[in-house]
Image (cartoon, helix red, strand yellow):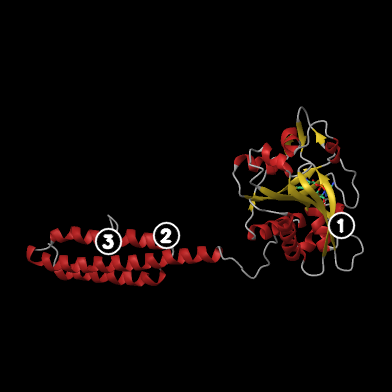
Amino acid sequence: MMELPELQEQIGQIKQDLDQQLPNLSAHDVLESFRVEFLGRKGRITQLFKQMGTLEPGARGEAGRLINELKDHATVCFEERDKLRQSEVRRQALVADRLDVSLPGSQHALGCLHPMTLVQREIEAIFMKMGFDVATGPEIETEYYNFEALNIPADHPARADWDTFYIEGDRLLRPHTSPVQIRVMEQSEPPVRIICPGRCYRRDTQDATHSPVFHQVELLWIEEGLSLAHLKHVLELFTQEFFGEGYEMLFSGDFFPFTEPSVQVHIKAPGATNWMEIMGAGMVDPAVLSNVGYDAEKYTGFAFGLGIERMAMLRYGIDDIRAFLTNDLRFIRQFS
Ligand code: FA5
């Protein structure tokens, strides 16, 4: 039979050993051997519980209370140290992962928009503010939309005015944006108020003001009661807004099979001596209105097609259209 004081002595010894180890319990393996030594299945505290059976029954209650107290103490010590260890592991991971924000970052080269895109967007914004919608059409067109519907039959000499790239059959690369007018009118009833920006192709010899690939913006307004005065007013508002003060505008007579009367519009920059032809324009020919099923007695309207490159040249004082296509970043970056 064991006496209670003997067990109390053992408890005191175990507590002393346990407390001695506390300052060193930081690493995982030390903590683990602490747990095994005191709290494990064969640990010293578990052994104490087993010895209770050798006590007199009257002393067992007190012994159980004392051993449980010791067990609670050991458990709390273990859990606190384990928590500290885990937060230390996390801290070390954070330190190892630390980002030095004072280091120079990696540089990403910033692109910029091509002046053609900028000018096209600006033109669109001005006309959208006036109430025009933006429409687009295919760059590969048919002879019907590019010529016939625009009142230029197959044998008409005016076809030669558009030095067209033919592909095969009746397909061609559109030399102007006017076919989009027809496509839009076929799909909608008057009033029609649209602009159509896009790329065009011509077998033009390249020089300072001509390129085989260029851009136009077409405008079309069909409604009752429109006259050449409305066309002139829209153009004045537009050039004023796009160029600002000091630019002059000149109208000269011209011929297009799809407008009657037809004009060419020329612009002169402040201080310049030369006029630059920037667009063809006119009142939409009644034959074109009839081709799309509109009542030509009731509706009138006007249209124009302007060259975006030439607008940009005038605005920025660029004297050669080829600058837009040479991909010289020093040139392109000036505009963004
Ligand atoms: C036409 O293309 C007509 N479709 C314009 C039009 C529309 C008239 C609606 C009436 C009603 P023109 O061939 O003149 O017209 O061309 C119009 C503009 O496109 C020219 O003033 C010019 O600014 C531009 N342009 C024409 N060819 C070239 C080219 N090869 N390079 C650069 N710009 C060009």
**Which of disc 2 and disc 3 is earlier in sequence?**
2
Foreground disc of the pair 3, 1? 1
| Cβ atoms under marks 3 and 1 closer than 8 Å | no
Give SS at disc 1: strand
Residue 201: quadrant of the picture: top right
Q: Horizontal placement of 62 versus 109: left or right?
A: left
- Amino acid type, callout 2: Asp
- Amino acid type, callout 3: Arg
Asked whether residue 111 is in view, the answer is: no
**x, y percent for residue 194:** 65, 50
> Which residue carries the number 3 mark?
44
- Amino acid type, callout 1: Met
> Which residue carries the number 2 mark?
29
Give SS at disc 3: helix
Nearest the camera: 149 or 35?
A: 149
**Which of disc 1 and disc 3 is earlier in sequence?**
3
Q: Work out which residue is located at the far left of the displayed protein and give it.
A: 58
Q: Work out which residue is located at the far front of the displayed protein and give it.
A: 297
Foreground disc of the pair 3, 2? 2
> Which residue carries the number 1 mark?
276
**Which of disc 1 and disc 2 is earlier in sequence?**
2
